[in-house]
Amino acid sequence: MAEETRTTRNSVAGEAQVENLMQAGHMTVHLHGAQPAAQGRTPCQLPLEIQHFENREDEQARVHRAGEDWFAGDSDPARPLIVSISGLAGVGKTTLGFRIARRLLESCPDGVLHADLDEGRRDGTADVADVLRQMLRALNGSEGEVGHSLAERRREYLDATRHRRLVVVLDNVRRFEGEAELLMPASAGSAVVLVGRRTPADLDPGVAVELPLRPLTEEHAVRLLLRIAGDPAPAADPEALAELARLCAGLPAALRVAGRWVRRNRRRDRARLLAGLTVELRQNGVPETEPVWNATYHDLGDPARTLYRLLAVEPAPGISPQAAVALLGAGEDTAEEALAELEDAGLVDIVPDLDDDRAVRLRMHDLVRAHALRRAATDAADGEAADGRRRTIRWHLRQAQRADELWAGKRMTLAAPVAALPDAPDVDFGGKPEALHWLHSERRVLHSCVRVAYDAGLDAESWALCEPLWTHQLDHPGSADDIDSFRLGRDAALRAGDLPAVIRMRCQLARPLWESERFTEAGTELDAAVSAAALLVGREDEHRKLYASALEFRGRLRAEQGQWSAAVPDYRHSLRLHQQIENPYGELLLTYLLGQASEGLDELDRAVEELRHAHAMARELRRERMTARTGFALGRVLLRLGRAEEARELYEAALGAARERRSTSEQVRVLEALAALHRREGDEAAAERCLATARALKSAGGAQNA
């Protein structure tokens, strides 16, 4: 395009539109703010300061401290002070950038230049030459000609800025394009504020202050809403304000829309107001951010666009990068490149895993997810979401089965193992502790997969996922998710007409029910399971094992209610079935349970005999978990018989095993038993140490299971 035909969109009509553009992080070069003048006049390409601003004090203070040190001569004098503000569209980057620029004018009094590099960007490339032309005219105070080539204009710009102390605000800077470096002023007394989705990775000179912006906290979001609404009435309904703030997910751009919505609809009741705004934001997006997100989306490559759409319908928020490989289904290299694009575009955050500081998770902001859903509704191919959902569910099921087998060893499972998925590598667990830790850290995703698989009609996958979740539940009881998932697993097996799976799922569901003291519901499930297993049983060992398991569960329910005499017949029947099919682990488990029943019936000598036999079997079979449990139960009976030293040794071994498994519930149980033993011996200090550790574990365990 010839230079004389270029136009610069540099006027904005109305104060409200100025606010909108600032919140979107999208601002054009405002030459009218500079007023062309003679050499020596200072340009000031800053819009009016936004009326309502909230928080960001820490970020501004960091820049202030850095500026004091920098311009006092304590830092490198050969380059300008560079501040980078990064974050999601709509988080308030540009607004903060202008605010910081005003404060930097105290140290850089020769004016402010501002350029939006997305203005005139074509095929992802900014027109740096045109930006330099506009900046030179603002600096020279003249409409005269400037050099024609980029190189000429760059030389003129360096010369014009050499002896000036300027603030240069560069908006919508891309991370890897190298465009910001061409717009650096030559003066060491200048400051540059870079605004973009990510801090430029290849900038030379480097960035002095990085300010990654997060959405506002709920407290600050509510304050901003109140200011924009401009009416004391909303303050009388703090719950409604908090709901609005959560709906806007802390984005100032969305909060401005909500605040103006409240002002326009102040006579509506809370329910209608929230419903209307929810439709507005979810269906139409935020006016200030939607064009930015659309442009960002269209700049992505095909695999990144596909992954963006798929992440929006992923079964659970916060999946791992490895799961994203399975979700995309295009191979590891392609998925990694697509993820890098999404991260650089600010559409996906890679954040630390709450359960494992060595691992990371992918997160999408709620409003970004809503945008991805809108793009999926428009752009996705037929079956794209269903195929991605099926891949990621099966990948998670395969990893969970592998982790379960590695940790728990060979046990009764009914689901067929899932074969390796093409283009989706398996997790390298390394060892048994890592396998159990993976099950724990992925528990929320696995529970979500159960639900989504059920809703999608993937019944075999839905109930199969419950089997490895059972292993996690044994060491981490008390989660409402277990009841929900195991109930869905039962319903999926019923819908599939898979009777053995129905029996197994009823048994699994019963345990978290009785742990929640919902004994009647648990009894209903187990009576149905035992009746069905009795009809199913024949000569096949697997069916007899399933019947034995159902009897065992019903006996345990009765034991949980203190009905020891009623539990024993079910235990003995189950033991005989395990002996008939020569199942050593089944014999071990039922011998252990009979020992507990004997203790409950105050038949302590019999209990010692049975539990000692079970403990020896567990060690022989190398079942670490059962070795610890049988040892703890034996220690408890020995303590009742006055054999404290033997009990202490067994308790300490059980505590070590529980710590290795990271089982909070078992650690607490053993610590409380040790405290009782110490108190019995008169060692109150040791008892209190055990109880303090148990209290800390309970507190941490409650937070983890939340």
Image (tube, rainbow, N blue to C red):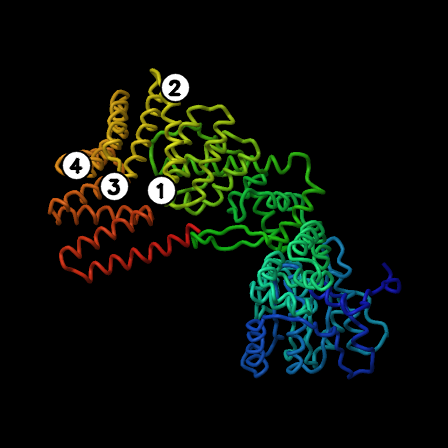
Image location (x, y in percent) of residue 259? 68, 63
Residue type pointed to by label 2? Leu
Residue linked to disc 3: 629
Residue linked to disc 1: 515
Residue linked to disc 4: 607
Q: Can residue 198 be seen here?
A: no
Query: Going from the N terminus, do you reach mark 3 or mark 1 first?
Result: 1
Residue type pointed to by label 3? Arg
When asked about the image quadrant of residue 530, the answer is top left
Residue type pointed to by label 1? Glu
In the image, 492 versus 645, the foreground residue is: 492
Single out the mark in the foreground, 4 or 1: 1
Secondary element at tag 3? helix
Query: What is the CA distance from the residue labelled 2 to the residue labelled 1?
Result: 28 Å
Single out the mark in the foreground, 2 or 1: 1
Task: Count up the numbered dots.
Answer: 4
In the displayed structure, does residue 640 sit left or right of residue 628?
left
Query: What is the CA distance from the residue labelled 3 to the residue labelled 4?
Result: 14 Å
Secondary element at tag 2? helix
When asked about the image quadrant of residue 611, the answer is top left
Query: Going from the N terminus, do you reach mark 2 or mark 1 first?
Result: 1
Query: Going from the N terminus, do you reach mark 2 or mark 3 first?
Result: 2
Image location (x, y in percent) of residue 529? 39, 27
In the image, 557 versus 672, the foreground residue is: 557
Mark 3 crowdedness (10 Å alpha carbons): few <14, some 14-19, many ≥20: many
Q: Which mark is residue 536?
A: 2
